[in-house]
Image (cartoon, grey):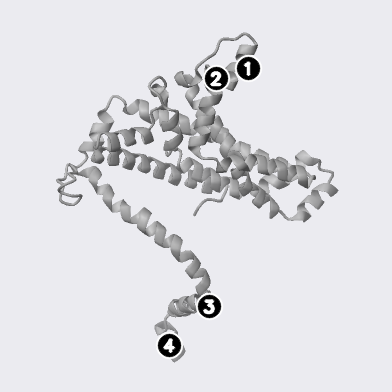
Amino acid sequence: MAPTPLAATAATTPPANRRGRPGRTRRSIRRHWQLYLLVLPPLVYFALFKYVPMANAVIAFKAYNVIAGIWASPWVGLEHFERFFSNPVFGTIVSNTFLLSLYALIASFPIPIILALALNEVRSRFFKRTVQMVTYAPYFISTVIVVSMAILILSPRIGLLSGITGFFGLPATDYLAQPDFFRHVYVWSEVWQTAGYSAVIYLAALAGVDPGLYEAAKVDGANRLQKIWHVDLPSIMPTVVVVLILSVGSIMAVGFEKAFLLQNPLNLSQSEIIATYTYKIGIQNADFSLATAVGLFNSAINLVLLLGVNAVSKRVTGSGLW
Protein backbone atom coordinates (compact mmCIF):
# COMPACT_ATOMS: atom_id res chain seq x y z
CA MET A 1 0.00 0.00 0.00
CA ALA A 2 1.50 3.37 -1.07
CA PRO A 3 2.00 5.97 1.65
CA THR A 4 -0.47 8.83 1.69
CA PRO A 5 0.78 12.32 0.72
CA LEU A 6 0.41 13.43 4.34
CA ALA A 7 2.61 10.58 5.58
CA ALA A 8 5.21 11.26 2.89
CA THR A 9 5.33 14.93 3.86
CA ALA A 10 5.73 14.07 7.57
CA ALA A 11 8.55 11.64 6.75
CA THR A 12 10.54 14.18 4.77
CA THR A 13 9.99 17.17 7.05
CA PRO A 14 12.66 17.59 9.77
CA PRO A 15 11.46 17.68 13.37
CA ALA A 16 10.34 21.09 14.54
CA ASN A 17 12.71 21.17 17.47
CA ARG A 18 15.68 20.28 15.24
CA ARG A 19 14.70 22.76 12.55
CA GLY A 20 13.96 25.65 14.89
CA ARG A 21 16.85 25.23 17.34
CA PRO A 22 19.25 27.75 15.71
CA GLY A 23 16.42 30.26 15.42
CA ARG A 24 15.48 29.84 19.08
CA THR A 25 19.13 30.29 20.08
CA ARG A 26 19.40 33.54 18.12
CA ARG A 27 16.16 34.83 19.61
CA SER A 28 17.33 33.92 23.09
CA ILE A 29 20.62 35.78 22.57
CA ARG A 30 18.82 38.86 21.26
CA ARG A 31 16.33 38.83 24.11
CA HIS A 32 18.79 38.10 26.94
CA TRP A 33 21.98 39.59 25.51
CA GLN A 34 22.78 41.25 28.87
CA LEU A 35 22.91 37.87 30.61
CA TYR A 36 25.08 36.36 27.88
CA LEU A 37 27.40 39.37 28.11
CA LEU A 38 27.62 38.82 31.87
CA VAL A 39 28.63 35.18 31.36
CA LEU A 40 31.21 36.01 28.68
CA PRO A 41 34.11 37.18 30.96
CA PRO A 42 34.13 33.97 33.08
CA LEU A 43 34.03 31.88 29.91
CA VAL A 44 36.97 33.81 28.46
CA TYR A 45 38.85 33.47 31.75
CA PHE A 46 38.39 29.70 31.89
CA ALA A 47 39.27 29.33 28.21
CA LEU A 48 42.51 31.33 28.49
CA PHE A 49 43.75 30.27 31.92
CA LYS A 50 42.29 26.77 32.34
CA TYR A 51 41.82 25.06 28.97
CA VAL A 52 44.55 26.60 26.80
CA PRO A 53 47.32 25.73 29.33
CA MET A 54 46.18 22.09 29.19
CA ALA A 55 48.02 21.78 25.88
CA ASN A 56 51.30 22.47 27.67
CA ALA A 57 50.82 19.32 29.78
CA VAL A 58 52.46 17.53 26.87
CA ILE A 59 55.86 18.34 28.42
CA ALA A 60 55.13 15.52 30.89
CA PHE A 61 55.87 13.18 27.99
CA LYS A 62 58.90 15.10 26.71
CA ALA A 63 62.44 15.91 27.78
CA TYR A 64 61.58 19.58 27.98
CA ASN A 65 64.29 22.02 27.00
CA VAL A 66 63.71 25.72 27.54
CA ILE A 67 65.75 26.71 24.49
CA ALA A 68 64.10 24.19 22.15
CA GLY A 69 60.61 24.96 23.39
CA ILE A 70 57.68 22.73 24.23
CA TRP A 71 56.92 21.29 20.82
CA ALA A 72 60.52 20.92 19.64
CA SER A 73 61.62 19.00 22.73
CA PRO A 74 62.13 15.25 22.17
CA TRP A 75 59.50 12.70 23.23
CA VAL A 76 60.36 10.36 26.09
CA GLY A 77 56.98 8.72 26.62
CA LEU A 78 56.24 7.64 30.20
CA GLU A 79 59.81 8.05 31.43
CA HIS A 80 58.98 10.85 33.89
CA PHE A 81 56.06 8.90 35.35
CA GLU A 82 58.35 5.90 35.83
CA ARG A 83 60.88 8.14 37.58
CA PHE A 84 58.21 9.37 39.96
CA PHE A 85 56.73 5.92 40.66
CA SER A 86 60.18 4.42 41.30
CA ASN A 87 61.23 7.29 43.58
CA PRO A 88 61.54 6.11 47.22
CA VAL A 89 59.49 9.11 48.39
CA PHE A 90 56.53 8.25 46.11
CA GLY A 91 54.62 6.24 48.72
CA THR A 92 55.28 8.77 51.48
CA ILE A 93 54.17 11.75 49.39
CA VAL A 94 50.98 10.11 48.13
CA SER A 95 50.02 8.76 51.55
CA ASN A 96 50.72 12.14 53.21
CA THR A 97 48.55 13.91 50.64
CA PHE A 98 45.71 11.42 50.92
CA LEU A 99 45.70 11.25 54.72
CA LEU A 100 45.86 15.02 55.11
CA SER A 101 43.03 15.52 52.61
CA LEU A 102 40.90 12.78 54.16
CA TYR A 103 41.42 14.20 57.64
CA ALA A 104 40.49 17.69 56.39
CA LEU A 105 37.38 16.33 54.66
CA ILE A 106 36.16 14.39 57.70
CA ALA A 107 36.76 17.31 60.04
CA SER A 108 35.60 20.21 57.89
CA PHE A 109 32.65 18.73 56.01
CA PRO A 110 30.06 18.19 58.80
CA ILE A 111 30.91 21.30 60.88
CA PRO A 112 29.45 23.87 58.43
CA ILE A 113 26.27 21.77 58.17
CA ILE A 114 25.90 21.64 61.95
CA LEU A 115 26.62 25.38 62.18
CA ALA A 116 24.03 26.20 59.52
CA LEU A 117 21.38 24.00 61.15
CA ALA A 118 22.06 25.57 64.55
CA LEU A 119 21.91 29.13 63.18
CA ASN A 120 18.68 28.30 61.37
CA GLU A 121 17.07 27.51 64.73
CA VAL A 122 18.21 30.75 66.38
CA ARG A 123 15.38 33.24 66.79
CA SER A 124 17.44 36.23 67.97
CA ARG A 125 18.55 38.16 64.90
CA PHE A 126 21.29 39.99 66.77
CA PHE A 127 22.83 36.78 68.10
CA LYS A 128 22.50 35.07 64.72
CA ARG A 129 24.19 37.91 62.84
CA THR A 130 26.92 38.16 65.45
CA VAL A 131 27.74 34.47 65.18
CA GLN A 132 27.68 34.66 61.38
CA MET A 133 30.06 37.63 61.40
CA VAL A 134 32.45 36.00 63.88
CA THR A 135 32.56 32.69 61.98
CA TYR A 136 32.56 34.25 58.50
CA ALA A 137 35.29 36.87 59.09
CA PRO A 138 38.29 34.43 59.29
CA TYR A 139 37.69 33.46 55.66
CA PHE A 140 38.98 36.87 54.57
CA ILE A 141 42.22 36.53 56.52
CA SER A 142 45.21 35.71 54.34
CA THR A 143 46.67 32.23 54.62
CA VAL A 144 50.03 33.80 55.48
CA ILE A 145 48.42 35.64 58.41
CA VAL A 146 46.67 32.45 59.61
CA VAL A 147 49.98 30.54 59.54
CA SER A 148 51.72 33.40 61.35
CA MET A 149 49.03 33.33 64.04
CA ALA A 150 49.42 29.56 64.40
CA ILE A 151 53.20 29.88 64.73
CA LEU A 152 52.88 32.59 67.38
CA ILE A 153 50.25 30.64 69.35
CA LEU A 154 52.23 27.39 69.22
CA SER A 155 55.68 28.91 69.79
CA PRO A 156 57.43 27.09 72.67
CA ARG A 157 58.92 30.34 74.05
CA ILE A 158 56.40 33.13 73.57
CA GLY A 159 53.30 31.24 72.42
CA LEU A 160 49.92 31.47 74.11
CA LEU A 161 49.65 27.69 74.43
CA SER A 162 53.07 27.39 76.09
CA GLY A 163 52.04 30.11 78.55
CA ILE A 164 48.90 28.15 79.47
CA THR A 165 50.77 24.87 79.88
CA GLY A 166 53.52 26.64 81.83
CA PHE A 167 50.93 28.04 84.24
CA PHE A 168 49.98 24.46 85.14
CA GLY A 169 53.64 23.44 85.46
CA LEU A 170 53.80 21.50 82.20
CA PRO A 171 56.87 21.70 79.95
CA ALA A 172 56.70 23.74 76.75
CA THR A 173 56.37 21.76 73.52
CA ASP A 174 57.36 22.82 70.02
CA TYR A 175 54.30 21.45 68.22
CA LEU A 176 55.35 22.54 64.74
CA ALA A 177 58.61 20.65 65.11
CA GLN A 178 56.80 17.35 65.72
CA PRO A 179 55.46 15.59 62.61
CA ASP A 180 52.48 14.09 64.47
CA PHE A 181 51.03 17.55 65.16
CA PHE A 182 51.33 18.92 61.62
CA ARG A 183 48.04 17.49 60.36
CA HIS A 184 46.13 18.68 63.42
CA VAL A 185 47.45 22.23 63.07
CA TYR A 186 46.74 22.28 59.34
CA VAL A 187 43.23 20.84 59.51
CA TRP A 188 41.82 22.72 62.51
CA SER A 189 43.20 26.06 61.36
CA GLU A 190 41.49 25.32 58.06
CA VAL A 191 38.22 24.52 59.85
CA TRP A 192 38.42 27.76 61.81
CA GLN A 193 39.07 29.74 58.64
CA THR A 194 36.44 28.22 56.32
CA ALA A 195 33.57 26.87 58.47
CA GLY A 196 31.57 30.10 58.49
CA TYR A 197 31.98 30.65 54.77
CA SER A 198 30.94 27.10 53.94
CA ALA A 199 27.90 27.38 56.21
CA VAL A 200 26.51 30.18 54.02
CA ILE A 201 25.78 27.63 51.27
CA TYR A 202 23.65 25.52 53.59
CA LEU A 203 21.94 28.57 55.11
CA ALA A 204 20.91 29.58 51.60
CA ALA A 205 19.53 26.08 51.00
CA LEU A 206 17.64 26.19 54.31
CA ALA A 207 16.11 29.54 53.36
CA GLY A 208 14.37 27.79 50.46
CA VAL A 209 12.64 25.15 52.59
CA ASP A 210 8.85 25.29 52.29
CA PRO A 211 7.40 26.79 55.53
CA GLY A 212 4.44 24.44 55.14
CA LEU A 213 6.72 21.54 56.02
CA TYR A 214 7.52 23.13 59.37
CA GLU A 215 3.85 23.76 60.02
CA ALA A 216 3.00 20.16 59.21
CA ALA A 217 5.80 18.91 61.48
CA LYS A 218 4.55 21.20 64.27
CA VAL A 219 1.01 19.86 63.90
CA ASP A 220 2.37 16.33 64.13
CA GLY A 221 4.04 17.22 67.44
CA ALA A 222 7.65 17.16 66.22
CA ASN A 223 10.24 18.85 68.44
CA ARG A 224 13.21 20.86 67.14
CA LEU A 225 15.53 17.90 66.71
CA GLN A 226 12.85 15.98 64.82
CA LYS A 227 12.24 18.99 62.55
CA ILE A 228 15.94 19.16 61.79
CA TRP A 229 16.15 15.43 61.10
CA HIS A 230 12.96 15.03 59.06
CA VAL A 231 12.62 18.46 57.38
CA ASP A 232 15.90 20.38 57.27
CA LEU A 233 18.32 17.58 56.44
CA PRO A 234 16.23 16.04 53.60
CA SER A 235 15.69 19.52 52.14
CA ILE A 236 19.39 20.38 51.96
CA MET A 237 20.53 16.86 51.04
CA PRO A 238 21.00 17.66 47.30
CA THR A 239 23.28 20.57 48.25
CA VAL A 240 25.17 18.37 50.71
CA VAL A 241 25.68 15.70 48.04
CA VAL A 242 27.02 18.19 45.49
CA VAL A 243 29.44 19.73 48.00
CA LEU A 244 30.58 16.25 49.08
CA ILE A 245 31.21 15.18 45.48
CA LEU A 246 33.27 18.29 44.79
CA SER A 247 35.20 17.82 48.04
CA VAL A 248 36.01 14.18 47.34
CA GLY A 249 36.86 15.03 43.72
CA SER A 250 39.58 17.37 44.96
CA ILE A 251 40.74 15.20 47.84
CA MET A 252 44.28 15.01 46.44
CA ALA A 253 44.46 18.74 45.70
CA VAL A 254 45.61 19.91 49.12
CA GLY A 255 46.29 23.62 49.34
CA PHE A 256 49.95 24.40 48.69
CA GLU A 257 50.31 27.68 50.60
CA LYS A 258 49.47 26.55 54.12
CA ALA A 259 51.32 23.23 53.85
CA PHE A 260 54.43 24.96 52.52
CA LEU A 261 54.36 27.70 55.16
CA LEU A 262 53.87 25.25 58.04
CA GLN A 263 56.57 22.96 56.68
CA ASN A 264 60.03 22.72 58.21
CA PRO A 265 62.82 20.13 58.13
CA LEU A 266 61.62 18.57 61.41
CA ASN A 267 58.04 17.77 60.29
CA LEU A 268 58.91 16.96 56.68
CA SER A 269 58.01 13.28 57.10
CA GLN A 270 54.29 14.22 57.23
CA SER A 271 54.21 17.72 55.73
CA GLU A 272 55.71 16.80 52.35
CA ILE A 273 52.74 16.44 49.98
CA ILE A 274 52.35 16.35 46.21
CA ALA A 275 51.86 20.13 45.94
CA THR A 276 55.04 21.01 47.85
CA TYR A 277 57.01 18.25 46.12
CA THR A 278 55.93 19.55 42.70
CA TYR A 279 56.99 23.08 43.66
CA LYS A 280 60.43 21.92 44.76
CA ILE A 281 60.97 19.73 41.70
CA GLY A 282 59.64 22.22 39.17
CA ILE A 283 60.64 25.63 40.53
CA GLN A 284 63.66 24.97 42.73
CA ASN A 285 65.21 22.13 40.68
CA ALA A 286 63.90 23.34 37.28
CA ASP A 287 62.80 19.80 36.34
CA PHE A 288 59.64 20.99 34.60
CA SER A 289 58.85 17.71 32.86
CA LEU A 290 58.88 15.67 36.07
CA ALA A 291 56.86 18.32 37.92
CA THR A 292 54.26 18.33 35.14
CA ALA A 293 54.08 14.53 35.21
CA VAL A 294 53.49 14.58 38.98
CA GLY A 295 50.80 17.24 38.61
CA LEU A 296 49.15 15.31 35.77
CA PHE A 297 49.13 12.16 37.89
CA ASN A 298 47.50 14.10 40.73
CA SER A 299 44.85 15.53 38.41
CA ALA A 300 44.08 12.09 36.99
CA ILE A 301 43.51 10.71 40.50
CA ASN A 302 41.17 13.60 41.29
CA LEU A 303 39.23 13.02 38.06
CA VAL A 304 38.79 9.31 38.80
CA LEU A 305 37.60 10.09 42.32
CA LEU A 306 35.17 12.71 41.04
CA LEU A 307 33.64 10.37 38.46
CA GLY A 308 33.46 7.48 40.92
CA VAL A 309 31.82 9.46 43.73
CA ASN A 310 29.36 11.05 41.31
CA ALA A 311 28.38 7.61 39.97
CA VAL A 312 27.91 6.22 43.49
CA SER A 313 25.89 9.27 44.50
CA LYS A 314 23.61 8.94 41.46
CA ARG A 315 23.01 5.29 42.29
CA VAL A 316 22.44 5.75 46.04
CA THR A 317 20.74 9.14 46.36
CA GLY A 318 19.58 9.81 42.81
CA SER A 319 21.37 13.18 42.64
CA GLY A 320 24.79 14.21 41.40
CA LEU A 321 26.67 16.80 39.40
CA TRP A 322 25.37 15.47 36.09
Residues tagged 2 and 4 counted as in contact (Cβ below 8 A):
no
Give the image quarter of residue 254. Answer: top left
Which is in the foreground here, disc 1 or disc 2?
2
Q: Is residue 234 left or right of residue 286?
A: right
User: Looking at the image, is 149 positioned above or below residue 195?
Assistant: above
Callout in the foreground (4, 3): 3
Name the residue nearer the viewer: 145 or 205. 145
In space, the residues marked 2 and 3 are separated at their CA atoms by 64 Å
Residue picked out by circle 4: 9
Residue 174 seen from this side: yes
**Displayed quadrant of residue 12:** bottom left
Name which quarter of the figure residue 137 lies in: top right
Q: Earlier in the sequence, mark 1 or mark 3?
A: 3
Q: Which residue is mark 1?
A: 164
Observer-nearest of 106 and 167:
167
* x 49%, y 47%: residue: 310
- How far is the residue under mark 4 from the one under mark 3? 33 Å
Is 200 in front, or is 214?
200
Residue marked by disc 3: 31
Other residues around mark 1 within 10 Å, as few (<14) / some (14–19) / many (≥20):
few
| Chain-order first, disc 2 or disc 4 | 4
* Other-residue count near label 3 (Cα within 10 Å), few / some / many at <14 / 14–19 / ≥20: few
Q: Which residue is mark 2?
A: 158
Residue placed furthest toward the front: 158
Asked if residue 239 lies left or right of residue 219, the reply is left
Q: CA distance from mark 2 to mark 4?
A: 88 Å
Q: Earlier in the sequence, mark 1 or mark 4?
A: 4
Looking at the image, can residue 229 be seen?
A: no
Residue drawn at point x = 41 percent, y = 58 percent: 45
